Image (cartoon, rainbow, N blue to C red):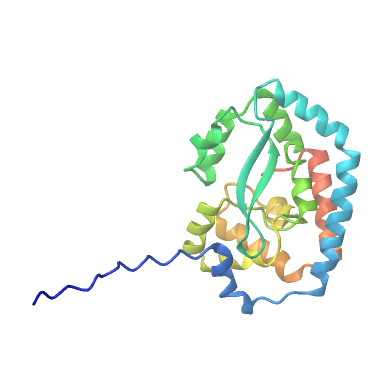
Amino acid sequence: MTVTEPTVHPQSQPRPETLVERYAHMAHTFERRTVDAVLRGLDIAIAGVALVLLSPVMALCAAAVATTGRPVLYRGRRVGLAGSVFTMYKFRTLRADAESRLGPYLGTTLTTLTADEQTRIGRVLRATKLDELPQLWNVVRGDMSIVGPRPIRPAFFEELSVEIPAYWQRLVVRPGLTGFAQLRLSREMTWAEKLAHDFEFVADRSIGLYLSVIVQTAFYVVSGKWSS
């Protein structure tokens, strides 16, 4: 009698957890606050009005960038609230395909290489922070806030979460156009030092603190004292 061997089906590999799922496992350690809803309302109101008032400026910026080629907008994947990944918009300030060349780098090395990739128009846009204006649309969409930790690329977020386990805690709020780390530190500072200032805002966030950061940022940009 012939005995037929049972067919063995290889077990499918488990699907890797997304950042959202990994965050959810730790979410019980974070407390949502009533002020977050108020700050979201301020985000929509301020960013919406700013988009309308600054639309002529944004149109001029887009036309200037277009003289250096396409695309006009830079689109980059970033980690947002609770681990969601979104597309962040900026006016392109670098030469075409620069992102593919700069992708593997971080910190001071990235700063140096980025400077070499900038177009002349891009240098002006970066110096005046006009390249950041399209992120107002990210704010209206709910990807970002006006004030919060700066958004970071998913690959580097993963690396930093291994080096600094507490790094996950910055996901309790939306990433921001500006924040404590941008006002107080430079790119040369360590990620742990920047994180400490992000945590200060996360812990103490309030309407007064939110408005204070916006006013300080406006002063820094107008006075040319912005350092990062």
Residue 30's x, y, as percent?
66, 75
Residues 71 and 61: in front is 71
Looking at the rendering, in which quadrant would you find the C terminus?
A: top right
Identified at 72% across, 29% down, the residue is 124
Nearest the viewer among 222 and 170 is: 170
In the image, residue 95 sits, relative to residue 160, either above or below, namely above
Q: Position of residue 150 (x, y in %)?
A: 67, 53
Residue at the top extreme of this rendering: 67
Judged from this view, the residue extending furthest toward the left is: 1
x and y percentages locating residue 1 in the rendered image: 8, 77
Question: Residue 193 is drawn in which quadrant?
Answer: bottom right
Count of marks placed on residues: 0
- In this view, 191 is above or below 114: below
Residue 33, picture quadrant: bottom right
The answer to whether 158 appears left or right of 186 in the picture is: left
Please indicate whether residue 128 sits to the left or right of residue 108 in the image: right
Extreme residue toward the front, this view? 1
Q: Is residue 184 above or below residue 163?
A: above
Q: Residue at x 53, y 63 (%)?
A: 18
Residue 10: x and y, percent?
30, 66
Task: Name the residue at 53% across, 46% down.
Answer: 107
Quadrant of residue 19 within the rendered picture: bottom right
Left or right of 107 in this view: 73? right
